[in-house]
Image (tube, grey):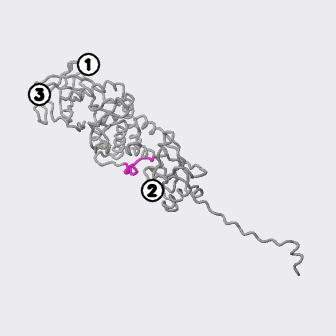
């Protein structure tokens, strides 16, 4: 709920019945009335404020006479209210989408205010909850991220983008289950290029968008924010900076490190949508096996790991053998020469950035053959065998004439 439009957010605050503008405390009897359901919501405590408006803890009385606790979000912004009401209806069947119980508009004190009665998250948002409980286990992180991804996948299949997957918009409900809410800047895309990146939280946006180098928000940018949430859950901290090279220090398995690294890595290598990320979490990568090739001539090759001989020597030998050397594997690469693994790799001995890229290319249908250093040197610098000098043979006639 902390996100504001980059192009200039509104500084207005909502005027509430029974409230004095700017006071932290509510006056007795402050209410909001829904003409849709006929319910009156008694506003008890302000629990959040921002460019979207204000959020209050409230109670209402059901037909059975029971008291029911909800959160009332009140805004003067019609566009944001319409988006939240629309996407709440669209995701009504999604268990991990925060439920909107009531939506209504009310005219008070000479102005229209737009209200949403939302499901009450008893543990608050993810940020405040992590401050209290600290880091989470990998098992919990996998389970809850997968549940949030189901909601995001429903949005992506409907060609919609959330654009605000921050710890302030993920809520911890009963049973410490995470639910996704706040669709105030969610929108549909009309083509695969995405939408203009005109509204986002700078602290939780990809760096290329935050710095203005890229001006289109795509599904892969929602995936980036999911990777950030996974890191925050594992660390138990939402304030520290997260860089892709820090992933190797996370307290989780190499498989999850590899998945998170792809979420946070370079834009072109991220999972393109929630469905790809779901599949990556479900299926662990196969252990890489060394292949065989019979020549290097005409092949595009790349190197990874520590080699027995200096890298410059290996590059020169590859070029002499007719190969084209590339700094890193890509869609045109044929061979990856693998040396001894670096201990600083992202996800263990089989999780270097170049090996991760080779697996990504393989999933896209492009095969890159991984060979060992021994085979490389055998092809690039084959040993020369010295031919033994022939022993002169004396003829039998000459032996007969030789005096004894």
| Label 1 element class | loop
Q: Which residue is drawn at 41% across and 41% down?
A: 139
- Which residue corresponds to mark 2? 343
Q: Of helix, strand and loop, which one carries label 2?
A: loop
**Quadrant in which residue 55 is drawn:** top left
Of the residues under marks 2 and 1, which one precedes in the sequence?
Answer: 1
Relative to 261, 48 lies left or right: left
Prevailing SS of the magenta stretch: helix
- Give me the C-alpha separation between circle 2 and circle 1: 64 Å
Q: Nearer the viewer, mark 2 or mark 1?
A: 2
Quadrant of residue 234 within the rendered picture: top left
Crowd class of label 2 (few under 14; some 14 to 19; many from 20; radius 10 Å):
few
User: Which residue is identified by label 1?
Assistant: 64
Task: Find residue 133 and report its image quarter.
Answer: top left
Distance, label 3 to label 2, CA atoms, is 63 Å
Categorize mark 1 by other alpha carbons within 10 Å: few (<14), some (14-19), many (20+): few
> Is the C terminus in the top left, top right, bottom left or bottom right quadrant?
bottom right
């Amino acid at each position: 709920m902390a996100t504001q439009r980059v192009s200039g957010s509104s500084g207005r605050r909502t005027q509430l019945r029974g409230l004095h503008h700017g006071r932290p405390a509510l006056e007795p009897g402050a209410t909001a009335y829904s003409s849709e359901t006929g319910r009156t919501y008694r506003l008890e405590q302000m629990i959040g404020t921002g460019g979207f408006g204000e959020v209050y803890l409230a109670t209402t009385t059901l037909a059975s006479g029971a008291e029911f606790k909800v959160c009332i979000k009140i805004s003067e912004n019609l566009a944001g209210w319409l988006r939240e009401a629309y996407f709440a209806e669209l995701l009504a069947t999604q268990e991990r989408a925060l439920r909107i119980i009531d939506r209504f508009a009310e005219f008070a004190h000479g102005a229209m205010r737009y209200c949403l009665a939302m499901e009450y998250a008893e543990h608050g948002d993810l940020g405040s909850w992590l401050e209290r409980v600290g880091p989470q286990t990998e098992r919990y992180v996998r389970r809850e991220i997968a549940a949030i991804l189901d909601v995001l996948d429903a949005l992506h299949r409907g060609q919609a983008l959330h654009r605000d997957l921050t710890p302030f918009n993920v809520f911890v409900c009963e049973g410490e289950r995470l639910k996704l809410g706040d669709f105030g800047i969610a929108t549909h895309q009309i083509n695969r290029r995405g939408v203009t990146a005109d509204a986002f939280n700078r602290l939780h946006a990809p760096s290329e968008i935050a710095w203005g180098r890229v001006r289109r928000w795509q599904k892969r940018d929602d995936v980036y924010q999911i990777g950030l949430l996974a890191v925050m859950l594992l660390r138990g901290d939402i304030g520290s900076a997260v860089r892709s090279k820090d992933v190797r220090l996370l307290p989780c398995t190499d498989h999850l490190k590899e998945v998170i690294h792809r979420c946070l890595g370079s834009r072109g290598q991220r999972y393109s949508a929630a469905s790809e990320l779901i599949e990556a979490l479900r299926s662990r990568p196969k252990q890489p096996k060394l292949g065989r090739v019979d020549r290097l001539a005409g092949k595009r090759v790349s190197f990874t790991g520590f080699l027995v001989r200096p890298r410059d020597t290996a590059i020169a030998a590859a070029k002499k053998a007719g190969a084209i050397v590339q700094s890193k594997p890509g869609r045109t690469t044929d061979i990856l020469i693998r040396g001894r693994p670096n201990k600083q790799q992202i996800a263990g001995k089989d999780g270097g950035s170049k090996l991760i890229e080779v697996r990504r290319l393989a999933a896209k249908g492009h095969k890159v053959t991984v060979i060992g250093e021994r085979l490389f040197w055998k092809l690039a610098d084959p040993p020369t065998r010295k031919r033994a000098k022939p022993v002169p043979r004396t003829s039998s006639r000459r032996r007969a004439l030789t005096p004894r």
